């Protein structure tokens, strides 16, 4: 049985926040200063008007995905690390965007040489990670994500999964503390690839 890697996309495989920030500035005259937590607290109107509401924040994200996705750039060494890991493991990209954006995400990733199964999700990732692991026969599984809330969700629903916290945006990473429910924090794919491969080679789940 091949091991399984389940990885997020934005700020793990592809840079997103700096490109989203550039776009909302250009198109909406809004400054975006992410703090690694809630996007809704990171938006400020340049004219001094009321901060965008949470509904407006979601509308802005809806304007970015998929129309502005071509702005996104590849995280250094991500494609090479996945290519190496794919020689020994199955890979699924589990991304929190709507199903309507799935075709664009598949094309976007393929353009960077990443051609693996893509699944869309909204909310916590614990349940979909558990379902994917069961579908593949409960192999040794590693989960990679930039948000602490998803590591907690996976810990709750799929405790046997190894959890790696990664924040690939260098301007954001120093302000984001390690996720308490992750087993490790690595922000560089050269080191992350080796850590993931070691979990696969060991052949045991995180709860063993």
Image: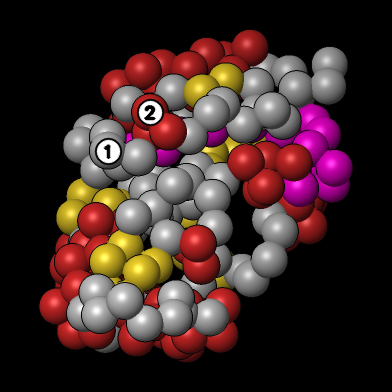
Task: Residue at 27%, 35% (x, y): give it.
Answer: 170
Residue that mark 1 sits on = 171
Seen in the picture, residue 24 relative to 85 is either above or below; the reply is below
User: For residue 178, what is the image quadrant?
Assistant: top right
On the image, the x and y values in percent for residue 155 come to 79, 37
Seen in the picture, residue 77 relative to 63 is either above or below; the reply is above
Query: Is residue 1 highlighted in magenta?
Result: no
Residue 174, labelled with which disc? Answer: 2
Task: Residue at 37%, 48% (x, y): give it.
Answer: 11
Task: Residue at 76%, 48% (x, y): give it.
Answer: 153
Query: Is residue 157 highlighted in magenta?
Result: yes
Q: Is residue 167 left or right of residue 14?
A: right
Q: Nearer the viewer, residue 86 or 161?
A: 161
Seen in the picture, residue 110 relative to 4 is either above or below; the reply is below
On the image, the x and y values in percent for residue 100 come to 47, 87
Colouring mode (rainbow / by chain / secondary structure / one colour): secondary structure
Q: Nearer the viewer, residue 155 or 58?
A: 58
Q: Nearer the viewer, residue 30 or 76?
A: 30
Residue 62, labelled with which disc? Answer: none
- Residue 9 in sight from this viewpoint: yes
Numbered circles on residues, count: 2
Q: Is residue 50 left or right of residue 168?
A: right
Region in magenta = 153-168
User: For residue 189, what is the image quadrant?
Assistant: top left
The answer to the question of whether label 1 and label 2 lie on touching residues, with beta carbons closer than 8 A, is: yes
On the image, the x and y values in percent for residue 78 come to 29, 38
Pointer 1: residues within 10 angstroms few (<14), some, or many (20+)?
few
Name the secondary structure under disc 1: loop
């Amino acid at each position: 049985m091949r091991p399984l890697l389940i990885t997020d996309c934005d700020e793990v495989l592809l840079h997103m926040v700096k490109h989203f920030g550039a776009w909302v500035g250009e198109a909406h005259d809004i400054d975006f200063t992410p703090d690694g937590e809630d996007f809704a607290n990171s938006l400020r109107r340049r004219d001094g008007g009321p901060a965008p509401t949470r509904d407006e924040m979601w509308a802005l994200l809806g304007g970015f995905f998929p129309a502005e996705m071509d702005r996104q750039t590849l995280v250094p060494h991500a494609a090479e690390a996945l290519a190496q890991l794919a020689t020994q493991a199955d890979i699924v990209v589990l991304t929190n965007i709507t199903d309507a954006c799935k075709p664009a995400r598949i094309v976007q990733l393929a353009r960077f040489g990443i051609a693996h199964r893509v699944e869309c999700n909204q909310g916590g990732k614990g349940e979909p990670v558990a379902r994917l692991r069961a579908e593949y026969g409960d192999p040794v599984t590693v989960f990679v994500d930039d948000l602490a809330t998803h590591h907690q969700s996976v810990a709750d629903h799929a405790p046997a999964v190894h959890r790696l916290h990664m924040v690939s945006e260098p301007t954001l990473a120093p302000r984001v503390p390690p996720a308490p429910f992750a087993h490790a924090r690595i922000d560089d794919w050269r080191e992350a690839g080796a850590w993931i491969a070691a979990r696969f080679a060991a052949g045991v789940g995180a709860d063993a």
